[in-house]
Amino acid sequence: AQTVTQSQPEMSVQEAETVTLSCTYDTSENNYYLFWYKQPPSRQMILVIRQEAYKQQNATENRFSVNFQKAAKSFSLKISDSQLGDTAMYFCAFMKLYNDMRFGAGTRLTVKP
Amino acid sequence: DTGVSQDPRHKITKRGQNVTFRCDPISEHNRLYWYRQTLGQGPEFLTYFQNEAQLEKSRLLSDRFSAERPKGSFSTLEIQRTEQGDSAMYLCASSWGLAGDSNTGELFFGEGSRLTVL
């Protein structure tokens, strides 16, 4: 079974600063996807960024980037130039190819003005 | 298409009553997932369908829970004889389930159905 661990229940960052959220996972699979989802207060989950395990290059999406370390089974999210709208729960997720998605417990991020 | 829709958004019921939630996925998606999320926790997988076939069920899905997707479009999740421990947000998501460029693995989520069992 796959497990996803987010060891930081809460984090805060000053507006315009950079923050890194941690995620580790456990799997025996070689091909899989990893995701970061954002869940703003009382709103639906939306995808922030995704990474295919077979790609060595780290994914980037504007201010969001990941540090994917396959051997270490680590998948951290870096948010640059943090904005107030980044305040949300962030969930790391793992998916075997064409299968179901499993989530970590989440990190509550607060961006302070 | 406006995305994944769930109904009702909120449901308050008394212990022992039955409740049913409906999910309408994005029309071109053939996979549909149900998750349960309690306050401050990540979504827990319950079950998923590819078209009308239920491919996997979590052991969290006790005998009181049943999910259907009769025509491979919308899905229902029924909870019989509700218990206070069933109080949670029930999330539905949909995706492409086939190999190919259109399959990014991404799940598209609805806003959820919040259940409160008194």
Image: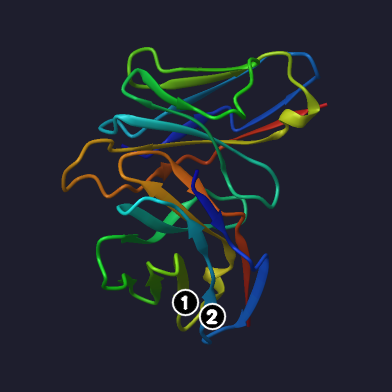
Q: Is residue A28 above or below residue B81?
A: below
The C terminus of chain A lies in quadrant: bottom right
Does residue A105 appear to the left or right of B24 in the view shown? right
Query: Foreground: A40 or A31?
Result: A31
Q: Going by the picture, which residue comes out furthest to the bottom?
A: A17
Which residue is located at x 65 percent, y 73 percent? A11
What subunit carries mark 1?
A
Image-quadrant location for residue B91: top right
- Snapshot colouring: rainbow
Q: On the image, numbered disc 1 is attached to which residue?
A: A79
Q: Amino acid at mark 2?
A: Val
Q: Secondary structure at mark 1?
A: strand
What subunit carries mark 2?
A
Q: Earlier in the sequence, mark 1 or mark 2?
A: 2
Q: On the image, numbered disc 2 is attached to which residue?
A: A19
Residue B17 screen position, x and y as percent: 74, 13
Disc 1, disc 2: CB below 8 Å?
yes
Instruction: Give neighbour class at mark 1: few <14, some 14-19, many 20+ (Cα, 10 Å).
Output: many
Which residue is located at x 49 percent, y 50 percent? A45
Q: Secondary structure at mark 2?
A: strand
Residue B38 screen position, x and y as percent: 68, 43
Q: Amino acid at mark 1?
A: Ile
Residue B18 screen position, x and y as percent: 68, 13
Q: Is residue A94 above or below residue A78?
A: above
Query: Foreground: B47 or A74?
Result: A74
